[in-house]
Amino acid sequence: MAENSPKLQQRLKIAAYLLIAGLVLEAITLYWSSPLSFILFAAGAGTLMALGIIVYLIAIAAA
Amino acid sequence: MANHAVTILVVLSIILIGLLILRPSLTAVTGGKILAFIALFILPISALGLGSVAHLQHATSTSFCLSCHTMEAYGQSLRIDDPSYIPASHFQNNRISRNEACYTCHTNYAMFGGLKAKLGGLKHLYIYYFGTVPEKIALYEPYNNRECLHCHASARAFEESSPHKEMRDQLGSNEMSCLTCHNKIHDVQNAGQLKFWKGP
């Protein structure tokens, strides 16, 4: 069975952690009805998840 | 309802991503690569999209609007104990949904409208937290009769009563504002002199 390179695995882990952080923040903001929660969702969760997706795409592109 | 769907999607995403963190060797095989694509790309994008829809839905709720201190007096004005006040009589008699009281009449303001209105809403947020809220708050544009007519148009009591039937075309084209006659609205400046209804 082929093995992933350590660099690929590291990048996938970073992407995974960023996405988990973004998803948890999104879940929290869903249960708090306020303009500030929308800002946290858009700027906070959105940024974390966007970064996670970008890191994932870079990881698979560079593999 | 949207909250539950997004929460399920978020939990599912976290579980799958967690699996990839605990078993990174999964991604060495084709099936694992597909799983990684779903968990690290498809599901997060779906969660973001559905989350945005859920947040925009929240933004239509009365509690969302009144969560800003600046809006306290406007929320109070919904309970003015005088039926000649339009927002109060609509709210107290369930002529509008109490849960979407603000949105029903202000459909193109701040979070609710198009891009320009939404950008205006973000500006409000910036001013609320980092700037100085002006003493007098006013709509950016004159109140559009559309907000009244989307409920009252084609209602018999409206269409067949005077003076509405005589000026129907002017009301429909916004040539004459409904507020010309129905001009008791929020009246927050006089809140201290008014009586309030203590109902539910």
Image (cartoon, rainbow, N blue to C red):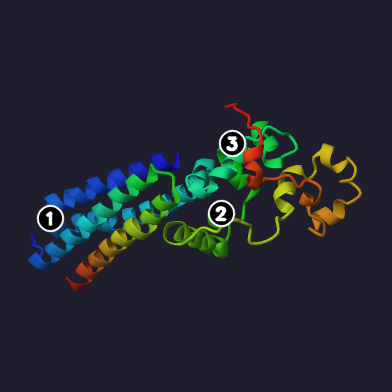
Q: Is residue B10 left or right of residue B97?
A: left
Question: Tag 3 or tag 2, which sits nearer the N-term?
Answer: 3
The residue at 49%/63% (across/down) is B123
Alpha carbon distance from label 2 to label 1: 43 Å
Q: Which residue is mark 3?
A: B98
The quadrant in which the N terminus of chain B is found is top left
A1 on left or right of A35: left
* Rendering coords of residue A43 (x, y %): 36, 60
Q: Tell me the amino acid under the disc marked 3.
A: Arg
**Badge number at residue A28:** none
- How far, Cα to Cα, is label 2 from label 3? 17 Å
Q: Which mark is residue B112?
A: 2
- Count up the numbered dots: 3
Residue B28 appears in the rendering: yes
| Residue B126 in the figure: left or right of residue B188 | left
Distance (Cα) linking label 3 and label 1: 50 Å
Image marks 2 and 1: residues in contact by CB distance under 8 Å: no
- Provide the residue designation for mark 1: B24
Dot placed on the residue nearer the N-terminal end, 3 or 1: 1
Q: Nearer the viewer, mark 2 or mark 1?
A: 2
